[in-house]
Image (tube, helix red, strand yellow):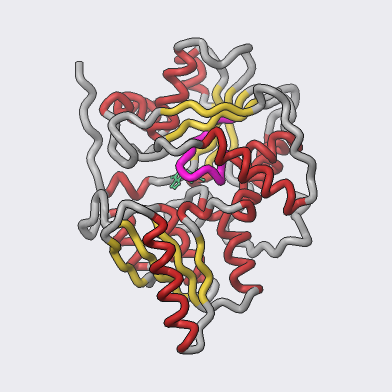
Amino acid sequence: MTGYNHLPRVPLGIYPTPFYKLEQISAQYGRDIYIKRDDLCGVALGGNKVRKLEYLLAKAKADGCDTVFTTGGAQSNHAMLTAACASRLGMKTILLLKDRGVTGHLGNLVLDEIYGAQVRMIDTDDYQDIYREMDRLGAELAAQGHKCCPIPVGGSTALGAIGYVHCVEELAAQVPEGVTIDHIVSATGSGGTTAGLLLGAKRYLPDAKVTGIGVDDDPFEEIVPRLAAGAAELLGWDLSRRDGDFEMVYHVGPGYAIPNPEDTPYIRELARTEGILLDPVYTGKAWAGMLRLLKEGHFPGDGPLAFVHTGGAAALFAMDLPEASK
Ligand SMILES: Cc1ncc(COP(=O)(O)O)c(C=O)c1O
C-alpha cells in the first residue's frame, strides 16, 4: 500500500483483511460474489470504524489530545471501536450515546465498559444536542488541563473516509488475475465508508460501480459525494465522477436499528453456507438488500459483486432476529 504520507495514520487493525469468493452463495445466486472481511480486522469484533480511526485518532494524537468524545446510538459499533482504539493509544474515551434502542447492559454497552469508556446516555433524538453537550464538556475538561477531540457520529468525516480509500487499494491488490469487479456493495449508515469506497474505486478499481445500501433514511445521495469530495481534497486528488459510478439504494425496513424480519433468512443462509455472521442493523440489511436487488436483475452485466463486510456482530448479543412471515 502506498500510504498517504502527508496525513498521519496510526496502525490499529491487522491488514490486509481476507478477500475471497463465496463459492456456495455464488452458485446459489448464479453470480460471482466476493467478500471483503473487514469484520476480521483484528480489533474487538472487527468492523469498518477501525480504518477510519487509524486517521482520526492519529490526528487526535498529533493534536495532543488526551480525551476522545464520540457519539452514536446506545448499541453503536463506532462508539465501542473508538473506545477500543483510543484506549490502546492511551487516550480516555467519553461516549455520549443516544438513550434509544437497546439500552440494557448488553452487546456493545458491555464492550464499552470492558474497553474502559465513560458512557453517558443523553435523552435526545438530535445529534446537534449531543454536539452541544460535547462542546460544554470539552470546555469543562479544558479548564482542568485536558485536550479533547470530538469525533462525529460514525467517524464520517472526510479524513475518516480515507480509511476506505485504503480499503479499496488493498482489495484491488487481492482481486484474482483475470477478474474484474463490477460492483462494490456495502452498508451506508453515516456515509463515510461508502464515500471512501467511491473515491478509492475511482482510483484503484475504475471499472467498479459503488452501491451503498442505506440502513437509515438520511440523504446519502448528497452526503456520500460531499464526503468523497472532501477526502479527495485532503489527498489532492481529482474526483471528477462518471455518471452512474455511484448509487444509493435504501433497505431500512421497519426503521434504523430495528431488525427487518425479511432479512432473517438471508442472515441465516450466509451463516449456514459460509460460516459468516451478519448483524441485523447494518450488514444483514445491506447483504439482504444486495441479494434482493440481484434477484430483481438490478446489477447489470455478469461481472462479480464485492460485498464489504463492515462488522457489527455485537448486535447479535443485544437483540434477537425476528422471524420472517411465511
Ligand atoms: C457494522 C457497521 N456497518 C456499516 C456501518 C455504516 O458505515 P458508515 O457509518 O461509514 O456509513 C456502520 C456504522 O455505524 C456499522 O457499525
Could you tell me residue 58's position as x and y percent?
A: 63, 67
User: Looking at the image, which is closer to me, 218 or 171?
Assistant: 218
Q: What range is drawn magenta here?
A: 184-194
User: Is any part of residue 277 visible from this angle?
Assistant: no
* Residue 249 in magenta stretch: no
Identified at 52% across, 14% down, the residue is 298
Q: Position of residue 180 (x, y in %)?
A: 70, 23
Q: Is residue 52 visible?
A: yes
Q: Position of residue 208 (x, y in %)?
A: 67, 26
Residue lying at 70% horizontally and 29% vertically, measured from the top left: 176
Quarter holding the C terminus is top left
Residue depicted at x 40% and y 46%: 312
Residue 83 image offset from top left, x and y in percent: 44, 65
Residue at x 42% of width, y 66% of height: 132
Judged left or right of residue 240, residue 309 is: left
Q: Is 139 situated left or right of 235 in this image?
A: left
Q: Quadrant of residue 63?
A: bottom right
- Say above or below: 320 vs 115: above
Residue 74 in the figure: left or right of residue 158: left
